[in-house]
Image: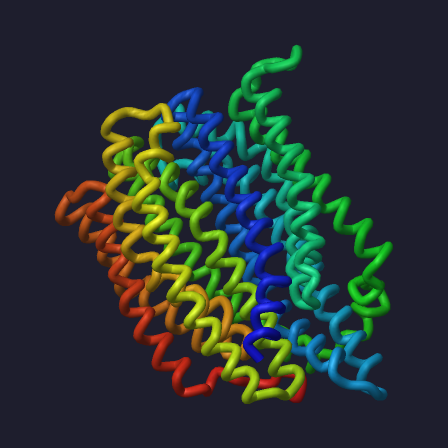
Amino acid sequence: MKKEFAKKLFYIALPITIQSLISTSVNMVDTFMIGKLGEYQIAALGVANQIFFIFNLLAMGLFSGSNVLISQYYGFLVTNTGEKIKVYKNKIKEIMGYSMVVGIFTALIFIAALFIMDDYIIKIFNDNSYVIKYGLDYLYIVIFGYLFTAISLCYGISYRSIGKSYIPMVTSFIAVIINIILNYVLIFGKFGAPVLGVKGAAIATLIARIIEAVLLIAIVHKSTPLFVVSISNLKSLKRSFVKQINETIMPVVVNEMCWGFGMVVYAVIYGRIGVTALASIQICTSIQNVFMVLFFGISHASCVMIANKIGEDDMEGTKIYSAYFLKTALGIGVSIGILLFLSKGFILSFFDVSSEVYRSSDNILMLSSFIFPIRFINILLIVGILRGGGDTKAALYFELITMWLIGVPAALAGAFVFKLGVEYVYGLVLIEEFIKFFCCLIRYRSFKWINNLTTA
């Protein structure tokens, strides 16, 4: 079973990892390019990215919840024959259609909110007039890309469910190359283009997201009839099935939002410490995301593989797979942590920032490198094993309790009561990772997380 496990993990996780690396690398390139304009522009990009971060979490929660159901139904399809095949194929179409409609509606709400609330959204994070100006310049353009992001995420995550994660990887790669080229041209005014600064970065991002969505739509209609959703699929949705979908999806959405809003609260706290603190966090977040792409690749692969196994009604295989995943997470977490610690100084040397921003960033990355093994296991258990097993409520409770009862209060106390520097506040936040680790491990060892949703 080890060979089968390794083969599936490689086939599913590698494209997801490469796609994540591509996407996070673009964010770091954006930060690097805009960093050449100044610290206010970096801070503004950080604020604007927090808005997208919230939307992306909502969308990811929605489509990741759908992914659990699609993966389990697909696991049944590949190991069974008979009358249920057509029924289950229609259920996959209904799940996709429902989540797509909700995703697009969510994007429209975000677009409307920006134009109604205007600069009040930016002021939540930072009240510096330059940060507000540059942040709005970026948001007014890039916000329309949220619609296309919803479409891309829906199809991209669904392809993971059936083990074809290389398709969204390819489309993401094409979009990223376009984004980088347009960034260079439009931010700095190359090849006769005007110098647009942060507006140029926003235009480049919008165009890239449109192209990615169009490519995925074309591929789905040409080669993946299982994902082609019609109006009839939406009309055939029964209330009982919508209830079942929501029971699986909503804990994931709430989970992502609770975690996301917690991260936003952290960003607000860092922003109130000062522009220097906000710039340090933005730089470190971009760097950490690159180092964590393998974490998320393996975690998302584990969700699919665990769910497929449950859909196949192979409970013993599910337990064996989960144990393999935990051993893999520990080894990779230690290795990546060491790599980050050894390379942090070299990476930071590429950023044109003040000595204070450099020092804070160096300390934050050092703390991150130490916590990586535990953080990876937590991500694997929550995003992968518990969700793949259909135990989305337990994952929600662990995320909710540790962040909002431990992490956020610790950050607030550190910043506003004890007046600590940003690296010390960040260190206090990491306490939640240790508590989460023990909660998740206890749940895992009970095996109560294994639930076959196709028989519900």
Residue 179 versus residue 339: which sits nearer the camera? 339
Is residue 434 shown above or below 32?
below
Could you tell me if residue 357 is visible in this image?
yes
Residue 212 versus residue 294: which sits nearer the camera? 294
Query: What's the residue at 19%, 46% (across, down)?
Result: 416
What colouring method underlies this structural image? rainbow
Horizontal side of 396 relative to 281 (left or right) equals right
Query: What's the residue at 71%, 70% (across, down)?
Result: 95
Could you say which quadrant of the image residue 428 lies in?
bottom left
Could you tell me if residue 129 is visible in this image?
no
Is residue 186 shown above or below 31?
above
Query: What's the residue at 77%, 85% (across, down)?
Result: 80
Q: Position of residue 84 (x, y in %)?
A: 80, 86
Query: What's the residue at 28%, 24% (across, down)?
Result: 354
Residue 186 versus residue 344: which sits nearer the camera? 344
**Where's the N terminus, which quadrant?**
bottom right
